[in-house]
Image: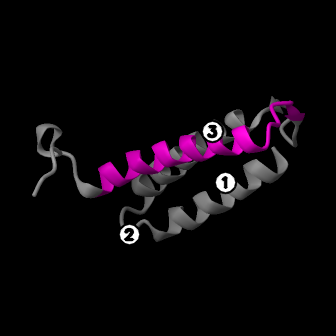
């Protein structure tokens, strides 16, 4: 059972990653619908950011965390996962 993933030689972790990104965007859309709060706020980096900006910064930073970890240490990826979760919390709380 490949469920159509073989055309691009995708693996299940790759598919799960893109499902996670889609779920993040869907969650942000539902959150914004029920609790509108599009007003930017200024964080510790001195940037005016909205929720969507903070999601983008979190995802981009997490990508760099994982790539840096892979370049320096390789697998397993539990270490960068923990660092990325801390990064998400930091960005959404203080950025």
Does residue 35 appear left or right of residue 80 in this picture?
Answer: right
For marks 1 and 2, give the CA distance. Answer: 20 Å
Q: Which residue is at 86% across, 30% downward?
A: 39
Q: Are marks 1 and 3 in contact (CB under 8 Å)?
A: no
For marks 1 and 3, give the CA distance. Answer: 18 Å
Tag 2 residue: 76
Does residue 90 appear left or right of residue 94 in this picture?
Answer: left
Q: Residues within 10 Å of mark 2 (few under 14, many from 20)?
A: few
Of discs 1 and 3, which sits in the foreground? 3
Q: Quadrant of residue 86?
A: bottom right
Q: Which residue is at 53% across, 45% downward?
A: 64
Q: Which residue is at 77% across, 33% downward?
A: 50
**Residue 29's disc number:** 3
Magenta highlight on residue 1: no
Does residue 58 appear left or right of residue 3 in this picture?
Answer: right
The location of residue 5, given as percent across then percent down, is: 17, 45
The location of residue 43, given as percent across then percent down, is: 87, 40
Circle 3: element type:
helix
Circle 2: element type:
loop
Magenta highlight on residue 38: yes
Q: Which residues are magenta?
A: 13-41
**Residue 88's disc number:** 1
């Amino acid at each position: 059972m490949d469920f159509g993933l073989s055309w691009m030689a995708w693996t299940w972790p790759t598919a799960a990653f893109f499902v996670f990104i889609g779920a993040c965007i869907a969650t942000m859309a539902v959150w914004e619908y029920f609790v509108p709060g599009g007003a930017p706020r200024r964080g510790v980096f001195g940037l005016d950011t909205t929720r969507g900006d903070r999601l983008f910064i979190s995802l981009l930073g997490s990508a760099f965390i994982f790539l840096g970890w892979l370049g320096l240490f390789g697998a397993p990826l539990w270490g960068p996962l923990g660092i990325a979760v801390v990064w998400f919390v930091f960005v959404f709380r203080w950025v």
